Amino acid sequence: MSTLDKIRELKRERNAVILAHYYVNDEVQAVADYVGDSFYLSKIAAKEEAETILFCGVSFMGESAKILSPQKAVIMPDMQADCPMAHMADIGRIQEMRKKYEDLAVVCYINSTAELKTYSDVCVTSSNALKIVRKLPNRHIYFIPDENLGRYVASQAPEKQFIFNDGFCHVHKSITAENVRKAKEAHPDAPVLVHPECTPDVVGMADYIGSTSGIIDFATANEAREFIICTEMGVLYELKQKNPGKRFYSVGHRQFCPNMKRITLEKVADALEQMDNAIELDEEVRILAYKPLERMLALGQ
Ligand code: 13P
Ligand code: SF4
Protein backbone atom coordinates (compact mmCIF):
# COMPACT_ATOMS: atom_id res chain seq x y z
CA MET A 1 0.00 0.00 0.00
CA SER A 2 1.37 3.49 -0.81
CA THR A 3 2.05 5.95 2.02
CA LEU A 4 -0.76 8.13 0.70
CA ASP A 5 -3.28 5.26 0.77
CA LYS A 6 -2.10 4.34 4.26
CA ILE A 7 -2.67 7.93 5.46
CA ARG A 8 -6.17 8.00 3.92
CA GLU A 9 -7.12 4.71 5.55
CA LEU A 10 -5.70 5.67 8.96
CA LYS A 11 -7.49 9.02 8.82
CA ARG A 12 -10.81 7.20 8.48
CA GLU A 13 -9.97 4.67 11.21
CA ARG A 14 -8.88 7.34 13.69
CA ASN A 15 -11.61 9.84 12.76
CA ALA A 16 -8.80 12.31 12.15
CA VAL A 17 -8.32 15.50 10.16
CA ILE A 18 -4.98 16.81 8.96
CA LEU A 19 -4.17 20.51 9.41
CA ALA A 20 -1.07 21.87 7.67
CA HIS A 21 0.67 25.23 7.59
CA TYR A 22 1.74 26.73 4.25
CA TYR A 23 5.41 26.24 5.20
CA VAL A 24 5.39 22.42 5.32
CA ASN A 25 6.56 20.27 2.39
CA ASP A 26 4.36 20.26 -0.74
CA GLU A 27 3.35 16.58 -0.48
CA VAL A 28 2.21 17.13 3.11
CA GLN A 29 0.11 20.17 2.11
CA ALA A 30 -1.38 18.01 -0.66
CA VAL A 31 -2.63 15.34 1.77
CA ALA A 32 -4.03 17.81 4.34
CA ASP A 33 -7.74 18.50 4.87
CA TYR A 34 -7.04 22.12 5.79
CA VAL A 35 -4.03 24.23 4.76
CA GLY A 36 -3.65 27.81 5.87
CA ASP A 37 -1.98 30.49 7.92
CA SER A 38 -1.79 30.39 11.72
CA PHE A 39 -5.08 32.27 12.30
CA TYR A 40 -7.09 30.13 9.90
CA LEU A 41 -5.67 26.92 11.41
CA SER A 42 -6.47 27.98 14.97
CA LYS A 43 -10.07 28.77 13.98
CA ILE A 44 -10.36 25.32 12.37
CA ALA A 45 -8.82 23.65 15.45
CA ALA A 46 -11.37 25.40 17.67
CA LYS A 47 -14.42 24.28 15.69
CA GLU A 48 -13.50 21.04 13.90
CA GLU A 49 -15.47 18.04 15.13
CA ALA A 50 -13.17 15.10 14.35
CA GLU A 51 -11.78 13.23 17.37
CA THR A 52 -8.16 13.61 16.30
CA ILE A 53 -6.22 16.51 14.82
CA LEU A 54 -2.93 15.67 13.16
CA PHE A 55 -1.09 19.01 13.08
CA CYS A 56 1.55 19.38 10.38
CA GLY A 57 3.45 22.33 11.74
CA VAL A 58 5.63 23.29 14.70
CA SER A 59 4.95 22.74 18.43
CA PHE A 60 3.24 26.04 19.22
CA MET A 61 0.62 25.25 16.56
CA GLY A 62 -0.18 21.84 18.05
CA GLU A 63 -0.20 23.35 21.54
CA SER A 64 -2.62 26.08 20.47
CA ALA A 65 -4.92 23.48 18.91
CA LYS A 66 -4.88 21.46 22.16
CA ILE A 67 -5.52 24.58 24.27
CA LEU A 68 -8.53 25.45 22.12
CA SER A 69 -9.82 21.87 21.80
CA PRO A 70 -8.78 19.91 24.89
CA GLN A 71 -11.23 17.07 24.27
CA LYS A 72 -9.44 16.13 21.04
CA ALA A 73 -6.24 14.16 20.59
CA VAL A 74 -3.73 16.52 18.95
CA ILE A 75 -0.95 14.52 17.31
CA MET A 76 2.31 15.87 15.85
CA PRO A 77 4.22 14.07 13.08
CA ASP A 78 7.52 15.20 14.63
CA MET A 79 7.79 16.34 18.25
CA GLN A 80 11.17 17.96 17.52
CA ALA A 81 9.64 20.46 15.06
CA ASP A 82 9.78 23.58 17.19
CA CYS A 83 9.88 27.29 16.39
CA PRO A 84 12.93 28.89 18.09
CA MET A 85 11.16 32.25 18.25
CA ALA A 86 8.38 30.74 20.39
CA HIS A 87 10.84 30.67 23.32
CA MET A 88 12.31 34.16 22.86
CA ALA A 89 10.61 36.09 25.65
CA ASP A 90 11.29 36.29 29.34
CA ILE A 91 8.64 35.94 32.06
CA GLY A 92 10.66 38.11 34.48
CA ARG A 93 10.64 40.94 31.91
CA ILE A 94 6.88 40.61 31.39
CA GLN A 95 6.36 40.98 35.14
CA GLU A 96 8.73 43.95 35.21
CA MET A 97 6.77 45.67 32.40
CA ARG A 98 3.47 45.04 34.19
CA LYS A 99 4.84 46.83 37.28
CA LYS A 100 6.20 49.69 35.21
CA TYR A 101 3.08 50.44 33.12
CA GLU A 102 -0.29 50.35 34.83
CA ASP A 103 -2.33 50.13 31.63
CA LEU A 104 -0.10 47.55 29.93
CA ALA A 105 -1.45 44.92 27.54
CA VAL A 106 0.89 41.99 26.93
CA VAL A 107 0.24 41.08 23.29
CA CYS A 108 1.62 37.67 22.47
CA TYR A 109 2.26 36.47 18.92
CA ILE A 110 0.80 32.97 18.59
CA ASN A 111 4.38 31.83 17.76
CA SER A 112 5.02 31.38 21.50
CA THR A 113 5.07 28.60 24.09
CA ALA A 114 1.91 27.76 26.06
CA GLU A 115 3.73 29.06 29.16
CA LEU A 116 4.32 32.51 27.63
CA LYS A 117 0.66 32.65 26.64
CA THR A 118 -0.36 32.18 30.29
CA TYR A 119 1.33 35.52 31.10
CA SER A 120 -0.35 37.35 28.22
CA ASP A 121 -3.55 39.35 27.77
CA VAL A 122 -4.25 38.50 24.16
CA CYS A 123 -2.72 36.44 21.37
CA VAL A 124 -2.37 37.62 17.79
CA THR A 125 -1.21 36.21 14.48
CA SER A 126 0.39 38.08 11.61
CA SER A 127 -3.00 38.41 9.89
CA ASN A 128 -4.94 39.91 12.81
CA ALA A 129 -2.30 41.66 15.00
CA LEU A 130 -3.04 45.20 13.82
CA LYS A 131 -6.81 44.81 14.03
CA ILE A 132 -6.59 43.40 17.57
CA VAL A 133 -4.06 45.93 18.88
CA ARG A 134 -6.26 48.79 17.60
CA LYS A 135 -9.25 47.33 19.46
CA LEU A 136 -7.46 47.13 22.84
CA PRO A 137 -8.32 49.85 25.36
CA ASN A 138 -4.72 49.87 26.64
CA ARG A 139 -2.24 52.49 25.42
CA HIS A 140 0.96 50.64 26.39
CA ILE A 141 1.58 47.45 24.45
CA TYR A 142 4.32 44.98 25.33
CA PHE A 143 4.65 42.93 22.17
CA ILE A 144 6.26 39.47 22.53
CA PRO A 145 8.17 37.57 21.23
CA ASP A 146 8.69 38.94 17.68
CA GLU A 147 10.29 42.38 17.47
CA ASN A 148 9.78 42.75 13.71
CA LEU A 149 6.04 42.02 13.75
CA GLY A 150 5.77 44.32 16.79
CA ARG A 151 7.54 47.14 14.95
CA TYR A 152 5.35 46.72 11.89
CA VAL A 153 2.14 46.84 13.96
CA ALA A 154 3.48 49.84 15.92
CA SER A 155 4.16 51.70 12.66
CA GLN A 156 0.48 51.29 11.73
CA ALA A 157 -0.93 52.12 15.18
CA PRO A 158 0.76 55.42 16.19
CA GLU A 159 -1.87 55.99 18.91
CA LYS A 160 -0.27 53.15 20.91
CA GLN A 161 2.99 53.18 22.85
CA PHE A 162 4.94 49.97 22.15
CA ILE A 163 7.60 48.23 24.18
CA PHE A 164 9.48 45.70 22.09
CA ASN A 165 11.11 42.38 22.85
CA ASP A 166 14.11 41.11 20.91
CA GLY A 167 12.71 37.80 19.54
CA PHE A 168 12.99 37.06 15.82
CA CYS A 169 12.42 34.44 13.15
CA HIS A 170 15.77 33.40 11.71
CA VAL A 171 14.19 32.51 8.35
CA HIS A 172 12.68 35.96 7.79
CA LYS A 173 15.68 37.71 9.32
CA SER A 174 17.91 36.05 6.69
CA ILE A 175 16.14 38.08 3.98
CA THR A 176 18.14 41.29 3.59
CA ALA A 177 17.35 44.63 1.95
CA GLU A 178 20.30 43.99 -0.37
CA ASN A 179 18.72 40.65 -1.47
CA VAL A 180 15.47 42.47 -2.20
CA ARG A 181 17.22 45.30 -4.07
CA LYS A 182 18.93 42.74 -6.35
CA ALA A 183 15.68 40.86 -6.95
CA LYS A 184 13.95 44.14 -7.87
CA GLU A 185 16.76 44.95 -10.30
CA ALA A 186 16.37 41.53 -11.95
CA HIS A 187 12.53 41.69 -12.00
CA PRO A 188 11.54 45.37 -12.11
CA ASP A 189 7.86 44.65 -12.85
CA ALA A 190 7.37 42.22 -9.97
CA PRO A 191 5.61 43.54 -6.83
CA VAL A 192 7.48 42.72 -3.60
CA LEU A 193 5.33 40.70 -1.16
CA VAL A 194 6.64 40.69 2.41
CA HIS A 195 5.73 38.85 5.61
CA PRO A 196 5.83 41.20 8.63
CA GLU A 197 8.33 38.90 10.42
CA CYS A 198 10.91 40.44 8.03
CA THR A 199 13.14 43.26 9.27
CA PRO A 200 11.82 46.86 9.01
CA ASP A 201 14.16 47.73 6.11
CA VAL A 202 12.73 44.83 4.06
CA VAL A 203 9.16 45.69 5.14
CA GLY A 204 9.90 49.24 3.97
CA MET A 205 10.55 47.95 0.41
CA ALA A 206 7.25 46.05 0.17
CA ASP A 207 4.38 46.61 -2.22
CA TYR A 208 2.29 44.37 0.01
CA ILE A 209 2.77 43.32 3.66
CA GLY A 210 0.78 40.44 5.12
CA SER A 211 0.52 36.92 6.44
CA THR A 212 1.13 33.84 4.30
CA SER A 213 -2.58 33.77 3.35
CA GLY A 214 -2.48 37.50 2.67
CA ILE A 215 0.50 37.07 0.33
CA ILE A 216 -1.22 34.21 -1.53
CA ASP A 217 -4.50 36.14 -1.86
CA PHE A 218 -2.71 39.31 -3.01
CA ALA A 219 -0.73 37.50 -5.72
CA THR A 220 -3.86 35.65 -6.87
CA ALA A 221 -5.97 38.80 -7.17
CA ASN A 222 -3.24 41.04 -8.60
CA GLU A 223 -2.88 41.48 -12.35
CA ALA A 224 0.96 41.34 -12.30
CA ARG A 225 2.43 38.17 -13.82
CA GLU A 226 5.47 37.88 -11.54
CA PHE A 227 6.16 38.51 -7.86
CA ILE A 228 9.09 38.68 -5.46
CA ILE A 229 8.32 36.57 -2.37
CA CYS A 230 9.80 37.54 1.01
CA THR A 231 8.70 34.72 3.27
CA GLU A 232 9.27 30.97 3.67
CA MET A 233 9.07 29.34 0.24
CA GLY A 234 6.53 26.69 1.28
CA VAL A 235 3.92 29.25 0.14
CA LEU A 236 4.97 28.48 -3.45
CA TYR A 237 2.92 25.29 -3.43
CA GLU A 238 -0.39 27.14 -2.98
CA LEU A 239 0.76 30.13 -5.06
CA LYS A 240 1.49 27.86 -8.03
CA GLN A 241 -1.73 25.86 -7.60
CA LYS A 242 -3.79 29.02 -7.70
CA ASN A 243 -1.68 30.84 -10.31
CA PRO A 244 -0.24 28.36 -12.80
CA GLY A 245 0.63 31.13 -15.28
CA LYS A 246 2.45 33.44 -12.85
CA ARG A 247 6.11 33.44 -11.77
CA PHE A 248 7.41 33.74 -8.22
CA TYR A 249 10.97 34.63 -7.23
CA SER A 250 12.76 34.06 -3.95
CA VAL A 251 15.37 36.60 -2.82
CA GLY A 252 17.89 34.39 -1.07
CA HIS A 253 18.95 30.84 -0.40
CA ARG A 254 17.78 30.52 3.18
CA GLN A 255 14.03 31.01 2.85
CA PHE A 256 13.32 27.55 4.30
CA CYS A 257 12.24 26.80 7.84
CA PRO A 258 14.15 23.67 8.90
CA ASN A 259 11.59 22.88 11.58
CA MET A 260 8.59 23.01 9.26
CA LYS A 261 10.51 20.89 6.75
CA ARG A 262 10.92 18.10 9.34
CA ILE A 263 7.35 17.02 8.57
CA THR A 264 7.32 14.24 5.95
CA LEU A 265 4.57 11.99 4.59
CA GLU A 266 6.17 8.99 6.32
CA LYS A 267 6.04 10.79 9.68
CA VAL A 268 2.39 11.70 9.04
CA ALA A 269 1.57 8.02 8.41
CA ASP A 270 3.60 6.85 11.44
CA ALA A 271 1.99 9.38 13.77
CA LEU A 272 -1.51 8.31 12.70
CA GLU A 273 -0.61 4.66 13.08
CA GLN A 274 1.10 4.91 16.49
CA MET A 275 -0.95 7.83 17.91
CA ASP A 276 1.98 8.38 20.26
CA ASN A 277 3.07 11.97 19.57
CA ALA A 278 0.16 13.54 21.42
CA ILE A 279 0.36 17.08 22.85
CA GLU A 280 -0.13 16.92 26.63
CA LEU A 281 -0.55 20.09 28.67
CA ASP A 282 -0.88 20.73 32.35
CA GLU A 283 -4.58 21.64 32.85
CA GLU A 284 -3.76 24.80 34.83
CA VAL A 285 -1.48 26.00 32.02
CA ARG A 286 -4.10 25.10 29.42
CA ILE A 287 -6.85 27.07 31.16
CA LEU A 288 -4.64 30.16 31.58
CA ALA A 289 -3.36 29.95 28.00
CA TYR A 290 -6.91 29.55 26.69
CA LYS A 291 -7.91 33.08 27.74
CA PRO A 292 -5.60 35.05 25.39
CA LEU A 293 -6.33 32.65 22.52
CA GLU A 294 -10.09 32.91 23.07
CA ARG A 295 -9.78 36.70 23.16
CA MET A 296 -7.88 36.56 19.86
CA LEU A 297 -10.66 34.56 18.24
CA ALA A 298 -13.24 37.04 19.53
CA LEU A 299 -11.35 40.24 18.60
CA GLY A 300 -9.90 38.89 15.35
CA GLN A 301 -13.25 38.30 13.65
P1 13P B 1 1.36 33.20 9.41
O1 13P B 1 0.88 31.81 9.34
O2 13P B 1 0.50 34.02 10.30
O3 13P B 1 1.53 33.82 8.07
O4 13P B 1 2.80 33.17 10.12
C1 13P B 1 3.91 32.60 9.59
C2 13P B 1 4.75 31.80 10.53
O5 13P B 1 5.86 32.10 10.78
C3 13P B 1 4.24 30.61 11.11
O6 13P B 1 5.30 29.98 11.73
FE1 SF4 C 1 9.31 29.89 13.56
FE2 SF4 C 1 10.18 31.31 11.50
FE3 SF4 C 1 9.89 28.69 11.22
FE4 SF4 C 1 7.72 30.28 11.42
S1 SF4 C 1 9.24 30.27 9.78
S2 SF4 C 1 8.08 28.35 12.49
S3 SF4 C 1 8.49 31.85 12.85
S4 SF4 C 1 11.32 29.74 12.62
Image (tube, grey):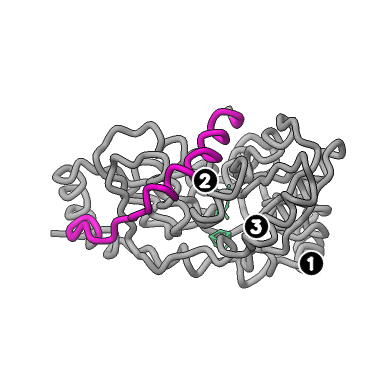
> Which residue type carries mark 3?
Pro
Disc 3 packing (10 Å; few <14; some 14–19; many ≥20): many
Residue 277: assigned label: none
The residue depicted at 67 percent of the width and 46 percent of the height is: 106
Q: Residue under label 1, please give it.
A: 182
CA gap, disc 2 to disc 3?
A: 16 Å
Q: Is residue 59 above or below residue 152?
A: below
Count all numbered tags in the image, as a single digit: 3
Quadrant where the C terminus is found in the figure: top right
Q: Tag 1 or tag 2, which sits nearer the N-term?
A: 2
- Which element type, helix, strand or loop, lies under badge 1? helix
Magenta-drawn stretch contains 274 = yes
Q: Which residues are magenta?
A: 271-300
Where does the image place residue 114, in percent across and percent down from the top left? 49, 53
Task: Please give the residue where the numbered disc 2 appears in the rendered image.
Answer: 38
Residue 200 lies in quadrant: bottom right
Q: CA distance from mark 1 to mark 3?
A: 30 Å
Identify residue type, mark 1.
Lys
Q: From the viewer's perspective, is the residue at label 1 or at label 3 nearer?
A: 3
Report helix, strand or loop for mark 2: helix
